[in-house]
Image (cartoon, rainbow, N blue to C red):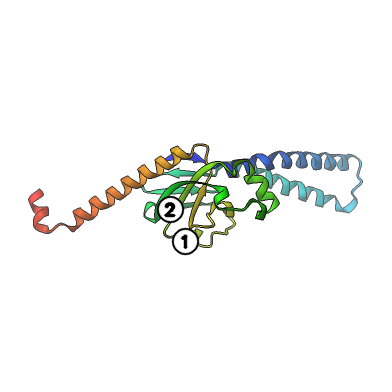
Amino acid sequence: MKKHKLLLFDQMSRRMRGKLLWLGLTLLVLAVVDLIRPFLGPTFYLLWLVIGLVALLWIYYSILLRRTDIFVGPSYLLLRGPLREVKISYGRIETITSTQMSQHFNLKQLKARERSLVKPVFAATCTFISLNSWPKSLQKRRTLWFPRLLFGVRREGLLLVSPNWLTLNRDIEEARRKWHDARRQKNQKDGRSLAAQILDW
């Protein structure tokens, strides 16, 4: 399988892991000080609870989110999210084209967090995979596993911002063509008469 990184997730990881690290260290210092010279009283356990939550978020943004990629395999595309993987058959793909996020989203209508995330790549060329149907796990599009910026608005499909959109397009087109060729050969073979198959023996 050929692996391609998705820049939106990479940017999200870079933006959050530094902030969470500083927040976690600051809270940890307060907790240590409280152990030496108690000043929080009976609510000290809440501080440790928050530290645990920040640690979990740091693991999510620093480790799990960074493993989000798109894999081009011989039989399907594999969209790997932080906590879930989705297989997309080449039979669902109609076209693979180049586009820009600016053609799918209005920057002013995005939330502040989304706006700061997409601004660096808003005018960059990216890959759009038009789909004729969605895998069951992506039918609602708005899921806990993938952000809405991953999905086209004006057309049904995936909006993939990668470091090299040209290579991604070429890899998907090549894998899709081979998949369709293999399907056609299989159908032709299965569709022959018994007499034709015997002649080949």
Asked whether residue 61 is in view, the answer is yes
Tell me, for residue 88, which label it has, or none.
2
Q: Secondary structure at mark 2?
A: strand
| Mark before the other along the chain sequence, 2 or 1 | 2
Q: Secondary structure at mark 1?
A: helix
In the displayed structure image, the side of residue 201 where residue 65 appears, left or right: right
Residue at the spot of label 1 = 136
Q: Amino acid at mark 2?
A: Ile
In the displayed structure image, the side of residue 178 where residue 41 appears, left or right: right
Which of these two is toward me, 116 or 59?
116
Q: Position of residue 112 (x, y in %)?
A: 70, 51
User: What residue sits 91% from the left and 44% below the top?
Assistant: 38
User: What residue sits 68% from the left and 54% below the top?
Assistant: 111
Asked whether residue 82 is in view, the answer is no
**Mark 1 neighbour class, 10 Å CA radius: few under 14, some 14 to 19, many 20 or more:** few
Q: Position of residue 45 (x, y in %)?
A: 82, 51
Which of these two is toward me, 71 or 171?
171
Q: CA distance from mark 2 to mark 1?
A: 10 Å
**Mark 2 neighbour class, 10 Å CA radius: few under 14, some 14 to 19, many 20 or more:** some
Q: Position of residue 109 (x, y in %)?
A: 66, 55
Which of these two is toward me, 148 or 69?
148
User: What residue sits 68% from the left and 45% below the top?
Assistant: 116
